[in-house]
Amino acid sequence: MHIAWLGKKSPFCGNVTYGREITNALLDKGYQVSFLHFAQEEDEHNNWPDCQEVMLPFLYKSQVYTIPSPKSSKVLTQSLKDLKPDLVHASLTLSPLDFLLPEICEELNIPLVATFHPAFDNKLRTIQSSTQFITYQLYAPFLANYDQVIVFSYLQRDLLIRLGVPSERLAVIPNGVDTHKYAPGASSLNLKQQLNAEVIYLYMGRIAPEKNLETLLKAWKISQMEPQNKLLIVGDGILTSSLKPIYGEDQGVFWLGFIADEQRRIKILRAVDLFILPSLIEGLSLSLLEAMSCGLACLATDAGADEEVLKGAGIVLNTQRVFSQLKTLLPVLRDNPDLIFPLKQKSRQRVLERYTLSANISQLEALYSQVLTQRNANISHFYR
């Protein structure tokens, strides 16, 4: 089967990781994959060997959204005509091109599957989550025209059904992580010795308002976690320059910046003890799954599908009370580090039970077959 994958290779974000992991897994299973993405000729991508690549012109792209150039739809249409894929899978990039895809694929008679990534808070408790709700409202009428739309949780599915997307067009396939690659093990970094720490906490992700990192940093500072506890910040974003000067090494906070090297990120995960994700909105965090798969104790908010992931396997915070809860929990963990270690095994076990990449791919293959069978049945019925 030939899959035309429409997604992202840069800048780095969860969508990029999703596309890389899924397409590599499909290639390993013998699928033909063509990767269509917004890029410039000088962009270099070394993570997709033996994969045909089509570059779509754009005016602007970020971790959150993309603005295509006026000719991008023509380039996409012609590329699909030339490639003749059996199916298009769009890992939606929050681009105006997303709204044209059903029409383009219908014209070319190519089945169309989408993965819908935008973060959300089902309870709509924050300004950020209200903004994301508008995104869902905007997309819903167009998603109704895709053959199938993949979402990561039943919360997300229920929200889209309420907004008018037919239930039969929605498939819940949670994110999956390669549990062989992301696994507990020794780390060559020896961070505890370098930092003179007994316990190391980690935040890994974008430094952006919706990630709520400042609340974690304020709680960390007021809890006086030094000297035996250290907090590593891995990632970059628009708030880095304003937060980094205020929270530094004198408070046990170490800023490592954005780390592109996946193997180095895995070494960091294996070298630390507890992963914290204080987000106000989420989809289903791949960073959280990767940390859990590496056997870290995990603490995250109930935003998006993260509550489903972590409930019973870690510590879940309410998005409305992140600061007060962290202010209470951090000193308890500081004074009772033994509380952290029972959570490590639970994290790993939860991923093995529900969130493996192999299970994700099996469900995706079944969905592809379902979509193609339905399309062929519709064609046969039309000519009957």
Image: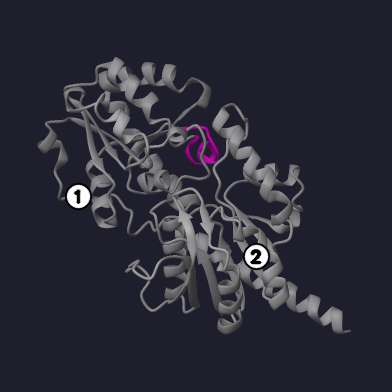
Q: CA distance from mark 1 to mark 2?
A: 46 Å
- Which quarter shows the C terminus? bottom right
Q: Secondary structure at mark 1?
A: loop
Q: Which numbered tag is attached to residue 169?
A: none
The answer to which image quadrant residue 368 occupies is bottom right
Q: Which residue is mark 2?
A: 101
Name the amino acid, label 1.
Answer: Ala
Residue 369, percent from left and from top: 64, 73
Is any part of residue 356 visible from this angle?
no
- Span of residues in magenta: 301-311
Q: Which residue is mark 1?
A: 186
* Label 2 CA crowd tier, 10 Å (few <14, some 14–19, many 20+): many
Of badges 1 and 2, nearer the viewer stands: 2
* Left or right: 224 as drawn, with respect to 169: left
Residue at point 44%, 33% (across, down): 209
On screen, 161 above or below 200? below
**In the foreground, 365 or 383:** 383
Q: Secondary structure at mark 2?
A: helix
Does the magenta-highlighted stretch encompass residue 43?
Answer: no
* Left or right: 40 as drawn, with respect to 332: right
Numbered label tally: 2
